[in-house]
Amino acid sequence: MAKLAVLASGNGTNFEALALALEGGAHRLVLLVHDRKDAYAQERAARLGIPSRYVTWAGRSREEAEAELGAALSEAGTELVALAGFMRLLSPAFVERWAGRLVNVHPSVLPAWPGVDSVRRSFDAGADEFGVTVHYVDSGMDTGQVIAQRKFRRWPGATLEAVETRVHELEHGLYPRVVLEMLDRVDAVRDRAAIGPGASGGPAEGGAR
Ligand code: GAR
């Protein structure tokens, strides 16, 4: 079993898609952290019986906020962190601490249209392609290494609302799939480490040294 935590700032549909994908399976969604008090994601967490915690960035340094975030993640035993509409840049130190175990979903085919409001900005600019990206998080704005992407072309008569709906459908399908695979890998790596050389109870014990 591997433990996932989700960071969200707003509505939380991706958080809920992750929660539903994990329900009844091998892994656990142990914590939602939200940085806006009124984030609707928090109500979804309450409905789903998932613990949530509000961490504010207001009126203090990023390091202070991230220290509280890091402590909350550790207390919950977090092994993988998924950003789901979390609208903040994390510091290089935080990103380094979670390297390889910090992922994000973004509503464009990166590197095109990083930042906020990507679907509306690309739609208004007349883009003929839309999509979603799951990527590792680094300290830049949606610049981390791409893990998976899905895209589709603008169709005749497409409205912004219809494109947004399609983008969300793609996110809700792709993100849980990628995160589940990563949780499986976290599990496998931990189990390998537990039976590796020098670990108590592992096959190396009593063997040739
Ligand atoms: C999602 O579309 C996500 O890709 C986007 O925020 C939305 C959150 O929706 N994230 C970014 O733009 C990150 N740069 P949700 O709260 O319903 O999951």
Image (cartoon, rainbow, N blue to C red):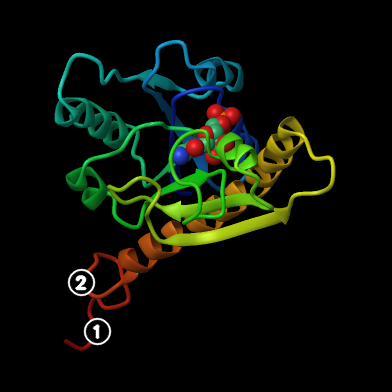
Residue that numbered label 1 is attached to? 207
Provide residue 28's location: percent of width, then percent of height. 51, 40
> In the depicted view, which residue is nearer to us: 28 or 46?
46
Name which of mark 2 and mark 1 comes first in the sequence: 2
Asked whether mark 1 and ligand 1 are closer than 8 Å, the reply comes as: no
Amino acid marked by disc 2: Gly
Q: Which residue is depicted at the point 37% across and 68% down?
A: 192
Q: With 133 as the anchor, is 103 left or right in this view?
A: left
User: Circle 2: is it few (<14), some (14-19), or many (20+) Cα within 10 Å?
Assistant: some
Q: With 14 as the anchor, is 190 left or right in this view?
A: left
User: Circle 1: is it few (<14), some (14-19), or many (20+) Cα within 10 Å?
Assistant: few
Q: Which residue is depicted at the point 17% across and 46% down?
A: 93
Q: Looking at the image, can residue 24 be seen? A: no
Residue that numbered label 2 is attached to? 198
- Rounded to the nearest whole Å, what is the CA distance between mark 2 and mark 1? 10 Å
Provide residue 167's location: percent of width, then percent of height. 67, 42
Q: Which residue is depicted at the point 15% across and 24% down?
A: 61
Provide residue 148's location: percent of width, then percent of height. 55, 60
Provide residue 23's location: percent of width, then percent of height. 63, 37
Q: How many marks?
A: 2
Say if 147 sits above or below 20 in the image.
below
Residue 30, image quadrant = top left
Q: Looking at the image, can residue 45 be seen? A: yes
Say if 76 sits above or below 38 in the image.
below
Amino acid marked by disc 1: Gly
